[in-house]
Image (cartoon, rainbow, N blue to C red):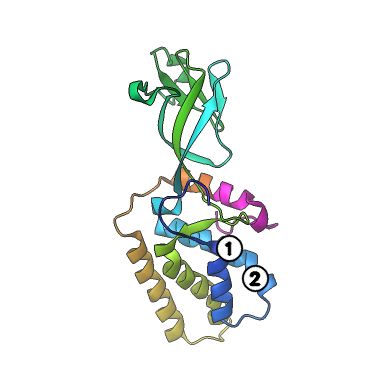
Amino acid sequence: MNGQVGKRVSVKRVVASVIRNLEITDASKNFHHFVEWAFEAERKIGSYKTFVKKTATINIVNKQASLPNDFLSLIDVKKSGNSSNSTYFSQSSASFPEDIDKENTFYLTEDTINISGNATALDIAYYAIDTDDEGYPTIADNHEDAVSAYLMWKYKSRDYYNGKLARGIYVDMERNWARLCAQARGNDNMPTPIEMKKAASIWNTLVPIKSLNGLLNV
């Protein structure tokens, strides 16, 4: 796993466990749905533990540098070099990036960082989606029960709507998911809707889980 702090669980393992617990025989048919639902669950939990903190050094050319492919949101940025005499950059107006006239300021576009000053390289700290060795997204281990409950509830919802599952069981599964969601959320910080939308785009482009329909309900 990349730049990881804290224990993570591969979404592939979570999905495989749910498929096994529900004794689903057509696993290949439903696998991508489960992976997509896993991000739905993470979005509803709404915690920064959905993501990991990473650092990277990026080279500046003409006061601009490309952001990492897995970049979600910026935490901090400084001039690369001697850590004992660090120069940190502050963000200028996102609405008026042309007003970037102060020394050591920056603004972001969709995939670049643009700076004032004469830096040739930057050290950045940022949030990203972590992946396992096979390229599947990972989740924080304390989210595993909640995500699993959501996957089972979503899958069995089909039976409920088709009249094959008793309402009491359906409601119990929904309540269990809600309880575990709140428990997983705890006191974690909340990403913004824009950050979650971008996270969905990154999640959906990870090669092992890409599907024709994209992420459901995103």
Q: Nearer the viewer, residue 214 or 123?
A: 123
Q: Is residue 47 visible?
A: yes
Q: Position of residue 91 (x, y in %)?
A: 39, 25
Give the class, few, some or many, for how many residues have Cα within 10 Å of label 1's Cα (few <14, many ≥20): many
Q: How many marks overall?
A: 2
Element under label 2? Answer: helix
**Above or below, 211 relative to 76:** below
Residue bearing the label numbered 2: 30
The numbered disc on residue 35 is 1
Q: Which residue is drawn at 51% across and 22% down?
A: 121
The residue type indicated by label 1 comes to: Val
Q: Which circle's residue, 1 or 2, is located before the other in the chain?
A: 2
Three-letter amino acid code at the position of disc 2: Asn
Looking at the image, which residue is at 64% across and 71% down? 30
70 in magenta: no
Image location of residue 67, percent across then percent down: 55, 32
Q: Quadrant of the rendered structure where residue 77 is?
A: top left
Q: What stretch is highlighted in magenta?
A: 200-218
